[in-house]
Image (cartoon, rainbow, N blue to C red):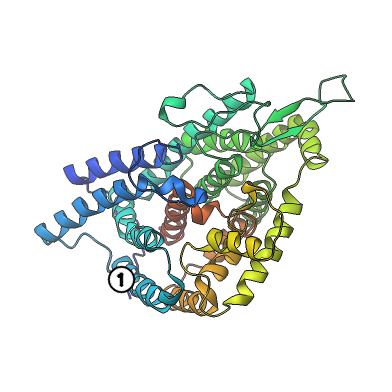
């Protein structure tokens, strides 16, 4: 199966220009909590898909309709076949789980995501990898500035009309931590909110910025563009204002891995540029150190305890249907039923997906469904680029310690675009080395 091994030059058409604008708007506004009663996901963790599903369906219908009518071979056979096989797998999984009443909306959601891959690849090829990377960086820089502004103000930006989450240190349910940095009130240190940007939670913003940071650093091997040189420290600053530990681990692993890879080209100007960027990262961390320490030692932080309790619940649910799973999109309903059946006392906010994508997939899809998916991906991606596995390692903390890269619309779309760009960047032609 042929995979492009060269950087194709963009060939923009009216259709591609319109699609780029629509997808850019969609990716920019997808995190916002829109209030349009179109599709109704009862699971709050997936409610960010309520309107995105219809928008994606509309975009895909127009795109694939035009492709079919014009009968032009503008789609990558690799991604079309991969999407087709994944669609077949989803249908088999849905039929296999019919006795468990899988959620048809979840099936529809996953099907649309699968067929977004050829569309995204077409846009990346049309724009060129360089253009797509710069657009990704620019859009997420906007989200980063949004989050930085919220952290400075310690309040939302007042954009509730378009769906911005209401933020205040005094509102219950807002992600915040106690910090005595810069104050002399040890009995009752003030609470600082974490940056949300346009997302429903700080961790969602952090994960999206971490994925963009990874793509930007890898792209730095190919293109020393000002947007990358200036944008990476700004993404890093925005990420620090989220105070996400998983995203912090992801970014630090990105810096360590890419430092090793850049060190192999230490005779070039790229190594000097990277050292200067690392110095900026270090100075930024030093400025934030008091706040980072407060975040780490916050006695009111219950994230670790909640995740351990969630793992215990997920283990109990997985034991009930280890091979078939709970059914697509049925985790929260099964968790509610499990608590009610065993007379466990719980709070409404505890009925959420397990904060781990691999565990959530095992619980909902079952061992058989996950094994089938892994087999398909291993078969299709067996000829992956040399460093691609290294690029994926920084994503592991984001996937293992939270669920938003699967349950929320914007982070999942960002993740898909990031994986596609990392693939394209590694298959691009090697840069010309310029000696000092």
Number of other residues with Cα within 10 Å of mark 1, as a class: few under 14, some 14 to 19, many 20 or more:
some
Q: How far from the left and from the top, in percent, is residue 389?
A: 56, 66
Q: How far from the left and from the top, in percent, is residue 301?
A: 76, 42
In which quadrant will I find the N terminus? bottom left
> What residue did someone put label 1 on?
84
Indicate left or right for 134 with 194 as reference.
Answer: left
- Residue at the (81%, 39%) spot, across then down: 298
Q: How far from the left and from the top, in percent, is residue 362?
A: 56, 70
Q: How far from the left and from the top, in percent, is residue 358?
A: 58, 65
Does any portion of residue 390 appear in the rendered image? no
Decide which of 398, 257 is in the foreground and name it.
Answer: 398
- Residue at the (56%, 44%) spot, across then down: 204
In which quadrant will I find the C terminus? top right
The number of numbered discs placed on residues in the rendered structure image is 1
Decide which of 157, 85 is in the foreground and name it.
Answer: 157
Does any portion of residue 129 appear in the rendered image? yes
Q: Is residue 117 above or below residue 37?
A: below
Which quadrant of the figure has residue 360?
bottom right
- Residue at the (50%, 21%) spot, across then down: 158
């Amino acid at each position: 199966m042929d995979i492009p091994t060269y950087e194709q030059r963009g060939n923009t058409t009216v259709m591609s220009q319109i699609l780029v604008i629509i997808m850019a708007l969609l990716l920019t506004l997808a995190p916002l909590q829109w209030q349009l009663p179109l599709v109704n996901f009862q699971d709050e963790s997936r409610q960010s898909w309520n309107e995105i599903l219809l928008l994606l369906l509309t975009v895909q219908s127009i795109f694939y309709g035009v492709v079919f009518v014009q009968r032009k071979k503008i789609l990558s056979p690799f991604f079309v076949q991969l999407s087709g096989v994944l669609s077949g797998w989803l249908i088999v999984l849905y039929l296999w789980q019919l006795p468990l009443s899988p959620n048809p909306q979840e099936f529809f959601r996953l099907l649309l995501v699968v067929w977004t891959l050829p569309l995204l690849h077409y846009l990346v090829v049309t724009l060129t990898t360089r253009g797509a990377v710069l657009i990704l960086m620019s859009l997420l820089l906007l989200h980063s500035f949004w989050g930085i502004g919220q952290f400075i103000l310690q309040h939302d930006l007042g954009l509730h009309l378009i769906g911005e989450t209401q933020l205040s240190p005094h509102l219950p349910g807002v992600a915040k931590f106690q910090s005595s940095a810069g104050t002399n009130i040890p009995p009752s240190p003030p609470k600082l909110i974490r940056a949300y940007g346009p997302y429903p939670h700080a961790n969602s913003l952090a994960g999206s910025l971490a994925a963009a940071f990874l793509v930007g650093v890898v792209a730095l091997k190919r293109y020393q563009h000002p947007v990358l040189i200036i944008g990476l420290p700004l993404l890093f600053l925005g990420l620090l204002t989220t105070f996400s530990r998983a995203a912090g681990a992801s970014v630090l692993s990105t810096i360590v891995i890419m430092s090793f890879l850049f060190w192999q080209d230490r005779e070039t100007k790229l190594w000097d540029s990277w050292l200067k960027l690392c110095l900026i990262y270090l100075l930024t961390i030093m400025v934030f150190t008091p706040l980072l320490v407060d975040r780490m030692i916050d006695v009111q932080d219950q994230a670790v305890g909640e995740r351990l309790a969630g793992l215990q619940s997920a283990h109990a649910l997985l034991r009930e249907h280890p091979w078939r799973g709970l059914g697509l999109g049925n985790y929260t309903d099964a968790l509610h039923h499990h608590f009610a059946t065993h007379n466990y006392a719980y709070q409404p906010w505890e009925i959420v997906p397990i904060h781990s994508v691999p565990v959530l997939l095992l619980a909902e899809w079952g061992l058989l469904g996950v094994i089938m998916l892994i087999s398909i991906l291993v078969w299709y991606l067996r000829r992956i680029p040399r460093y691609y596995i290294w690029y994926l390692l920084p994503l592991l903390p984001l996937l293992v310690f939270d669920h938003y890269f699967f349950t929320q619309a914007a982070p999942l779309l960002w993740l898909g675009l990031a994986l596609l760009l990392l693939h394209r960047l590694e298959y691009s032609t090697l840069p010309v080395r310029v000696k000092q």
